[in-house]
Amino acid sequence: MRIIKAKQLTHETFAPFGTFYSMTTPEGYALQGDIHRFFPDRISETYMTRVGFSPILVKKPEAMKITQVEYHNTTPEMILPLNDDMIIHVAPASAGIPLPDMTKAFIVPKGTLVKINTAIWHLAPLPVHEEELQAMIILPECTYVNDCTVVDLKEDEQFEIVL
């Protein structure tokens, strides 16, 4: 089975798959008042429909063996880890044919909003430390019904993520 080592998230290495921004340690210019600093529009997206903010709870597996992947044809997916750092795996868009040999895994710090670009292969985030990851998934309403292609990987395509 192929082993993928999860790497620290950097703008350079994640750029082919999307973008990210720390919502708990924001940087850059801020609009300021007496008691606040506002960091506008750090990640933006246009959805042509209502947006769903959906909690996801993911138990820490004994081994991070990946047997399925998914993508969305018409929308990027945003994920915000709330209680722990998370691991995500991504692979380039490929017209419906999984690319497990091109998969990368990243450690996303807690509080960092990640936007995974349209058509990028991925699946649920995984916890790094906690027994259960609590995260927020941001997608157009009902994407999981209307625009979610899930593919079972063949045994020789499956992989394991390690820290």
Image: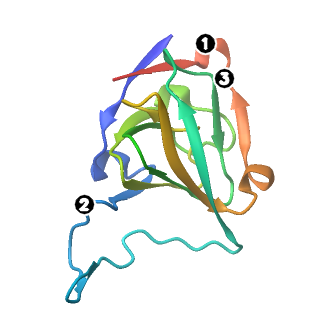
Residue behind mark 1? 156
- Point out the image quarter for the C terminus: top left
Query: Can see residue 37?
Result: yes
Type of colouring: rainbow
Q: Amino acid at mark 2?
A: Thr
Please tell me which residue is depicted at 48% across the width and 37% down the height of the picture: 133
Q: Are marks 2 and 3 in contact (CB under 8 Å)?
A: no
Please tell me which residue is depicted at 38% across the width and 40% down the height of the picture: 84
Of labels 1 and 2, the one closer to you: 2
From this viewpoint, which residue is outermost toward the right?
A: 145
Q: Earlier in the sequence, mark 2 or mark 3?
A: 2
Q: Nearer the viewer, residue 129 or 41?
A: 129
The Cα atoms of the two marked residues, 1 and 2, are separated by 40 Å
Q: Specify the label residue 153 is tagged with.
A: 3
- For numbered disc 2, what is the local secondary structure? loop
Q: Quadrant of residue 46?
A: bottom right
- For numbered disc 1, what is the local secondary structure? helix
Q: Amino acid at mark 1?
A: Asp
Residue behind mark 2? 25
Dot 1 alpha-carbon crowd within 10 angstroms: few under 14, some 14 to 19, many 20 or more:
few
Would residue 101 appear left or right of 111 to someone viewing this image? right
Q: Is residue 112 above or below residue 61?
A: below
Dot 2 alpha-carbon crowd within 10 angstroms: few under 14, some 14 to 19, many 20 or more:
few
Q: Nearer the viewer, residue 74 or 126?
A: 126
